Amino acid sequence: MTSKAKRIVLITCAVIAFVSFSGWSQQSKITPAQARLGERLFRDVRFSAPQGDLPAKCADCHLFDEDPQGLRPFADFFNRSWISYRPQSPQRFELRNSPGLFDVARQPRLHYDGEFTTLEDLVTGTFTGRPMGWLPNEQEQALTQLQTVVRQDPAYRAQFKTAYGIELDKLNRSEVAHHVARAVADFMRTLNSKMTSPYDQFVQINGLATKPDRNESPTMFAQRLLTRVSELEATKTLKLPNGFTATALQGMKLFYSAGNCVTCHAPPLFTDFSYHNLGISQVEYDQVFGAGAFASLTIPSASETQRPAERFRQFPTSGKPGAVDLGHWNFIDLPTSPLRRVNESDDQLLARMVGAVKTPGLRHLAYTYPYMHNGAYTTLEDTVKELQRLSEMARAGQVRAADQELLKIRIDEQEISLFVAFLNTLNENLKARSGVQNP
C-alpha cells in the first residue's frame, strides 16, 4: 500500500470511529423530556412561511408511520420533496431526495453535499430556508416567527423549562432559535438503527466482526470476515438466521470482494461518510441537454467563483442551461479537507469534487425508495444496474471527474439479484417500531 493510500485509510477509519463514538455518547445524554420537545417542534407546521401555498414542517419530508403507503425511516416517497411555491422563487421541488434520518447524528457533515457541520445548523437552516417556504432574504422574518410561536405557546414554555431549565420569555430571538435548534437536534439524535436486521443476526450468531478495527481498512476488514466465513463453511458450522438466505450469503461475498462496494459502504452503517462522483449528476444533466453536455460544461476554478454557487446547486431543466447539481463541489473546505491528495492543488481537488455526493448508508433500503440523491431510480435492481453501467462508462473515460472507486465496480448482469438479496438483509423490522414516534 502506498503512503498516500495509507493516509486515506487512516483518515477514513479515524472519522468512522470518532463519529460512531460521538453520536452514541450524545444520544445517551438526551432525556425523554428533551426528545419529546424536539419531536413536537419537528412536527409543528407553524414555523413555515405564511406567504407560501404549502404549510410545511420537518415531518412532511421525514415520515415515520404517518403515510398510508407504508413505513419510512423518517423519509418520504418523492423523488424530490415538495416545497411552498413563491412567485419570487418559482419552484415546487427540493433540490434532492430526502434521506432517512436514522443514524443522522453519526454523520460528520449533513446533507448530500456536506452543507452543514452540525445538526443544530441544519435545523436552523431548515427553519429559515426554502424547505419551510422562506426566501433567502427572509431569514430575519423566519427567526421572528419562530420566536413568536414558541414564546406565545404555554405548552412550549413549560416544555423548555422542564427539558432544559430555561425560560423563553427571558431569551432574545437568537437565543430562542439556538434552543429550538438544540431541541430538534436532540430528537434527531435519538433516531438510530437498532442493529437487529437479518445481517446483524447473521453476524452475531456466527461470532463475526461487526466493523473494521481501528486503522483497519474496509477491504482488510472484508478479507478478514470472508476468511472467517470460509472457515465456518468448511466445518459446516455457519448458521443462517431467518431472512438471511444462501442467496444473500452469495451477495454478501460479492459485496465484500469483487463488487468493490465495501470500500465506500463500510459497516456498521455501510458508509464511509465521504463524497464520491458516480456520474449521477452527469446522467441527469445529459438527459436534459444531450449526451456530452455535462462533459463540455464550463465549471470555474477555485479562484474564479465564490462557492456555494447558485447555478451549481440546482437540478437541470430545459429553461436553465448550465444549472446543475455539483454536490460537494459547493461546500468542500479546500484548506482543511481530508480528501486532498498529496501535492494536490486547490483546482485539482475542486475538479475531483464535481458531482461528488455523500455516500449514503445502506440500512433500511426497503423503506427509502426512490434511490440516489436525485431519487431517479425506483428499485434496487435499477440502481445496481445503473452503477454497473456507469462503472463501464468510467473505465471508458466517459464520466467526467469519475471517482476512482467507480472504475473498480465490476458486476455481472446475473449477479445483480445476489447483491439485492444481500442489501435486503440490512432492513430492520420497522413495524415493530410503528406507533413509536420517538424510537
Image (tube, rainbow, N blue to C red):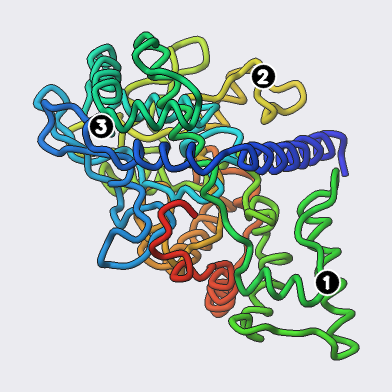
| Mark 1: few/some/many CA within 10 Å (<14, 14-19, 20+) | few
- Quadrant that contains the N terminus: top right
186 on left or right of 295: right
| Mark 2: few/some/many CA within 10 Å (<14, 14-19, 20+) | few
Which labelled disc corresponds to residue 207? 1
| Mark 3: few/some/many CA within 10 Å (<14, 14-19, 20+) | many
Q: Earlier in the sequence, mark 3 or mark 2?
A: 3
180 on left or right of 84: right
- 379 or 197, which is in the foreground? 197
Residue pointed to by mark 2: 336
Residue type for callout 1: Gly
Which of label 1 and label 2 is nearer to you?
Answer: 1
Residue pointed to by mark 3: 132
Q: Percent position (x, y) of residue 201?
A: 69, 73
Cα distance in 3D space between marks 3 and 2: 32 Å
Give me the residue at 65% from left, 42% from top: 28
Which of label 3 and label 2 is nearer to you?
Answer: 3
